Image (cartoon, rainbow, N blue to C red):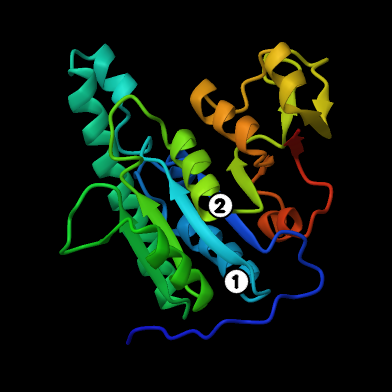
Amino acid sequence: MVAMNAPKAVDPSVKYKRIILKLSGEVLRGKSTDPIDSVVLDRICTQIKEIHNLGVEICVVIGGGNIFRGLTGEKRGVDRTTGDYMGMLATVINGLAIMDCLERMGVTTRVQSAIPMNQIAEPFILRRAVRHLEKGRVVIFVAGTGNPYFSTDTTAALRATEMHADIIAKATKVDGIYDKDPKKFPDAVKYEEITFLDALKQRLNVMDSTAFSLCLDNNVPIVVFDLDGEHAIRRAVQGKKVGTLVRN
């Protein structure tokens, strides 16, 4: 049965009404040897449903690194352009998995692809994507920007700008941004909040340079947080202290 949703009134606790939720493909793997761990997938979709029930308009941008990454393929002798297209197809697999899980939970979802594949996904059309959000649907953007040499971080920044999102919620495996790698340096200091310019000066690894420049130029804030935290996505959209906020 296809899930049906109507737009919900936005809960007063919500600070960011329209978000881009950026997920790396690796988060779907969890600790499993399988590319997509069903337990992890269910946990992520439960969090998405939770904020959907608060009336948040959600766009998901998903990576494909759990299946194939263009840069990794290049090290194995795969042509970079070919490898990037392979990675884009991996994001489609992940997007369909999230769609299936969400719809089993009763959340109406649409997948839009930057590469035409009409039998399994809609083409990316800006006004159609906005209309889906207005009707209370979750929209999943797959296949990156449709171009090689651009990461899914750049896709998130581009779609956030096009969709006039209030924020990019970048869910990762770390609890924020540090002045140096916390896994290597026990004295690493975590930032609660930092400006784009300070992050650039310190060369902090927030997003790749293209994505970061798009966010800086178009004033799209980013919150980087640990997806495994309890109600992590909900706390992020409510503007609570979670992870690190990057802003102008």
The reply, left or right, for residue 162 in relation to residue 89 is right
Where residue 144 appears, as percent x and y from the top left, is 35, 41
On screen, residue 27 above or below 82: below
Tell me which residue sits at (34%, 84%) in the image.
2
Q: Are marks 1 and 2 in contact (CB under 8 Å)?
A: no
Of badges 1 and 2, the one in the foreground is 2
Please indicate, yes or no, whether residue 227 appears anywhere in the rendered image: no
Tell me which residue sits at (81%, 73%) in the image.
12
Query: Which of the 4 image quadrants contains residue 220?
Result: top right
Categorize mark 1 by other alpha carbons within 10 Å: few (<14), some (14-19), many (20+).
Answer: many
Label 1 and label 2: CA atoms lie apart by: 13 Å
Q: Which residue is mark 2?
A: 20
Q: Secondary structure at mark 2?
A: strand
Dot placed on the residue nearer the N-terminal end, 1 or 2: 2
Closer to us: 175 or 157: 157
Please indicate, yes or no, whether residue 156 appears anywhere in the rendered image: yes
Closer to us: 49 or 120: 120
Tell me which residue sits at (34%, 44%) in the image.
35
Quadrant the C terminus occupies: top right
Tell me which residue sits at (84%, 34%) in the image.
192
What's under tag 2, amino acid-wise? Ile
Query: Which of the 4 image quadrants contains residue 149?
Result: top left
Where residue 178 appears, as percent x and y from the top left, is 75, 23
Where residue 195 appears, as percent x and y from the top left, is 78, 28
Quadrant the N terminus occupies: bottom left
Q: Which residue is mark 1?
A: 52
What label sits on residue 22 in the rendered view?
none
Where residue 188 appears, as percent x and y from the top left, is 79, 17
Categorize mark 2 by other alpha carbons within 10 Å: few (<14), some (14-19), many (20+).
Answer: many
Q: Secondary structure at mark 1?
A: helix
Closer to us: 238 or 232: 238
What's under tag 1, amino acid-wise? His
